[in-house]
Amino acid sequence: MCGIVGFVGNDRAIDFLIGGLEKLEYRGYDSAGIAVLNNNKFTVNKTTKRVADLKTKETEKLIGNLGIGHTRWATHGKPDLLNAHPHLSETQKFAVVHNGIIENYQSLKQELVAEGYTFKSETDTEVIAHLLEKYYKNDIKEAVKKTVDRLKGSYALGILCSDLPDCLIAVKNFSPLIIGVSENANVIASDITAIVPTTKKVIYLEDEQIAFIISHEIIITDKMGKPCKSEVSQIDWNVESAQKGGYDHFMLKEIMEQPNAIEQTIKNRIKQNEVYFEDFCIDEEKLKSFEKIQIIGCGSAYHAGVVGKYVFEEMLRIPTQVDIASEFRYSNPVINEKTLTIAISQSGETADTLAAIKEAQKRGSFVLSIVNVVGSSIAKASNGVLYTWAGPEISVATTKGYSTQLAVIYLFAVWAAKRLKTATKEELNAAVEELIKLPKLVKEALKCEKTIKETASKYKDAASVFYIGRNLDYAVSLEASLKLKEISYIHSEAYAAGELKHGTISLVQDNQLVVALCGVERLFEKMLSNIKEVKARGAVVFSCSEKANKQIEREAMINVYIPKTHNLFTASVEIIPFQLFAYYVAAAKGCDIDKPRNLAKSVTVE
Ligand code: G6P
């Protein structure tokens, strides 16, 4: 979590710092701060409000062309001004911003306190500022090297030294950090969305690398000080895709972008009615060696994995287990070289997923990841990657990230089914045809917006909502429920419809809103029975089914219809009304939709 930025160049630093932090606010918004060097002295401005609050008259006057900035998701110490970054060293020679966690900060702090250093904050970051000062004997490279050598944990750092008015220092270890390269300025940021407005040329810093960045030169070394080669890559995301484009919130914009995002993900991967992956890391022989598929992910990525389990078991007949990454990594998993691990992550930076990948690899498993952000830590750590070409996703609550993960899951399933001969030619053709149609069907599903908006305004004050479904409908109910609770703060639970009667039904009373997902045709009758059960206890039922299911209108008070698609691809159209429902409930309640309380988009802490 947390976002960091830094600037060195011909122009004043403040414009990039504030603009960049606004782009990174999704990574945490407990506080924000900047430090700019003017006449060898740091001016530091901090706020416990949003980044926009930093745009003061005083900030406007900052003409210095070297600076760093930070937007915080609190881990060590409450979200107040003292704990807000940047942090300064004892004599204010160093200013530091940090994303990550210094695991050994307590012992370092004790050591520094014993040596006379005073701490103003409760953060782990402040030890870094003091260590830099402790080791600085007019040799910056040596000071940074010695400091980094003492740190255990994850960190992306932006460092300034008041003796060096033209030098921005960046350090990376297990937290993302990218350098943007341009003629007039070089910049750093946790994410490319902050960099794109300045330049599309970037260097992805590797773990344990240190960069000394001046306006016309970048020197990258390993942590021992040995020079490292670096490659400048060109990004193809454009500035518009990282802006709201007329929508009130990024979330709504991203919901509406789903047909296009799915199209981007699918289009170059279907050739002559066959799924095709360029330079794919798995060949037929390798694929046939897998006896088990293990899926890992967190949050919505885990929910996409639950869909994956149903799809893979049905299409490939390979036993598939799906685990929450933070549970998997500590569970002594039974996997080996005959297991294909599939890690799913939009950001590619989720700490638990990254650690789970390493755990899987340690046990000999081959890791294929499904990732949106090119060059991210998870993409790099995996044995192979299938990218979801969703473009930048800014809203904390994922929508197009999830939808494109589903699209990649289907593509992989069809690709593998052909090689494993677990589907007939006709079945494969039918699946590919439906995949091609998917963007259009999702577009059609979005037409329910008006109905959903009206329903949302009626139920915005609901105390709790239940989502029930079976099989793929259950997988969708998990995601639908998460969407609602994370942005509208309404308590909600997703339940396997058949399991409801084993306990949870005791919570159903008069006027309890129960959303019944009935997209899986073969289980429709079973769902009707479950709907009757909750209705008998006073529930108000909101159903979702394919248009042909007229029977449901007799039972449910509210009905939303989704277009018919391949029986294994239902999740892609069925999630749409419920992303919109969550959005419009939260909007009717006046919630901060793109930045819900206590959350962050990229969770780089365990
Ligand atoms: C956070 C986000 C979720 C996301 C989860 C996993 O909790 O708020 O929207 O699903 O992290 O993130 P990833 O980037 O690994 O998909």
Image (tube, helix red, strand yellow):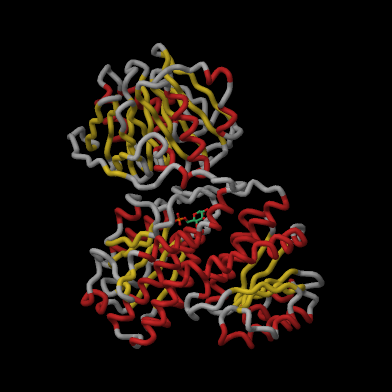
- Left or right of 254 in this view: 526: right
| Residue placed most toward the observer, 331 or 407 | 407
Residue 585 sits above or below residue 307 on the image: above
534 or 402: which is nearer to us? 402
Examine the image and state in which quarter residue 233 appears. Answer: top left
Residue at coordinates 70% horizontally, 74% vertically from top-left?
559
For the image, the number of numbered tags is: 0
Q: Position of residue 258 (x, y in %)?
A: 50, 60
Residue at x-position 31% and y-position 31%: 182
- Above or below — where is 599 with respect to 569? above
Q: Nearer the viewer, residue 66 or 391?
A: 391
Residue 474, located in which quarter of the rendered image? bottom right
Query: Can see residue 330?
Result: no
Q: Is residue 586 above or below residue 538?
A: above
**Location of residue 453 in the rendering, given as x and y in whole percent from the top left corner:** 70, 60
Q: Position of residue 272 (x, y in %)?
A: 30, 74
Residue 585, position in %: x, y? 69, 57
Query: Front-most of 96 and 378?
Result: 378
Q: Give residue 577's quadrant in the image.
A: bottom right
Q: Is residue 282 visible?
A: yes
Q: Is residue 10 left or right of residue 18?
A: left
